[in-house]
Image: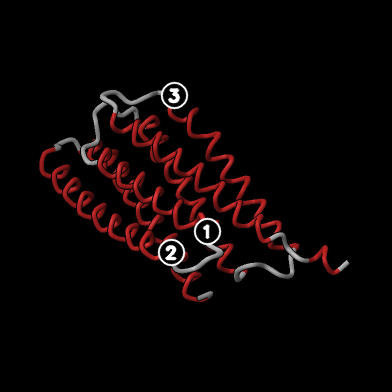
Amino acid sequence: MFNRLLPKEEKYFEDFKDIISHIQEMARITHAFFAAPEYDPNIYLKLKPLERRCDEIWSRVVKRLNKNFITPLDREDIFALIKKIDDIADILLGVCARVEMYNLSETVEGSEKLAAIIVLQTKELEVALQDLKNPGAQINECKAVKDLETEADTVYRASIKKLFTEEKDPLVIFKKKEVLDMLEGAADKCQSTANIILQVLIKNS
């Protein structure tokens, strides 16, 4: 009977791989959305199923944590990691929904570059999460995520400065700034995820 209480370690790691693959697909769709000359009005329909799948994985992991007495990593680390990854999905869906809701027809300068950085970050996170059971190899990927977040900060600051310098309509400024804020927030969440992975690696090394 005791064996039934032992967790299947692979399930947690499979969930990490599963959710980050959905995040990466969302990041690619988001980048294509902001890189296009005209915004796709059906973007929400493309992203929502992926975001819902991420929520399902998050919920499944939390339920398993509540049932298992023994976990392959510290419970708080598993919860923090899956939550941060799911937060990225929420932001990516939210930022594209804002463009649609605000009926933005003009390109938000800087958005394509920020979205491209997020794509690169999610690729590095995917590599870092592929074999979390074997600490050490993921450190370079985690550092790369942080370096990319620094690049995102630079793009964000330059875009905000240009927006306030060149745009005269306060409403347009508000709309575009929120889009840039959310994309920069997604890059921050990617870095936060990498930080948790580093903590796990150090704790289990």
> Mark 3 vs mark 2: which is more N-terminal?
3
Is there CB contact under 8 Å for labels 2 and 1?
Answer: yes
**Badge 2: few (under 14), some or many (20 or more) residues near its Cα, within 10 Å?**
few
Number of dots carrying numbers:
3
- Of discs 1 and 3, which sits in the foreground? 1
Q: Is residue 100 above or below residue 92?
A: above
- Image coords of residue 187 (percent x, y): 35, 52
Q: Nearer the viewer, residue 133 or 187?
A: 133
Residue 159 location, quadrant: top left
Report the residue at 40% width, 48% height from top: 123
Q: Residue 131 carries which label?
A: 1
- Image coords of residue 47 (percent x, y): 48, 34
- Left/right placement of residue 10 relative to residue 172 reads right
- Left/right placement of residue 83 relative to residue 154 reads right
- Label 3 secondary element: loop
Residue type at tag 2: Ala
How far apart, in angstroms, are the residues tagged by discs 2 and 1?
A: 9 Å
- Label 2 secondary element: loop
| Quarter in which the N terminus is drawn | bottom right
How far apart, in angstroms, are the residues tagged by discs 1 and 3?
A: 35 Å
Residue 149 location, quadrant: bottom left
Q: Which mark is residue 42?
A: 3
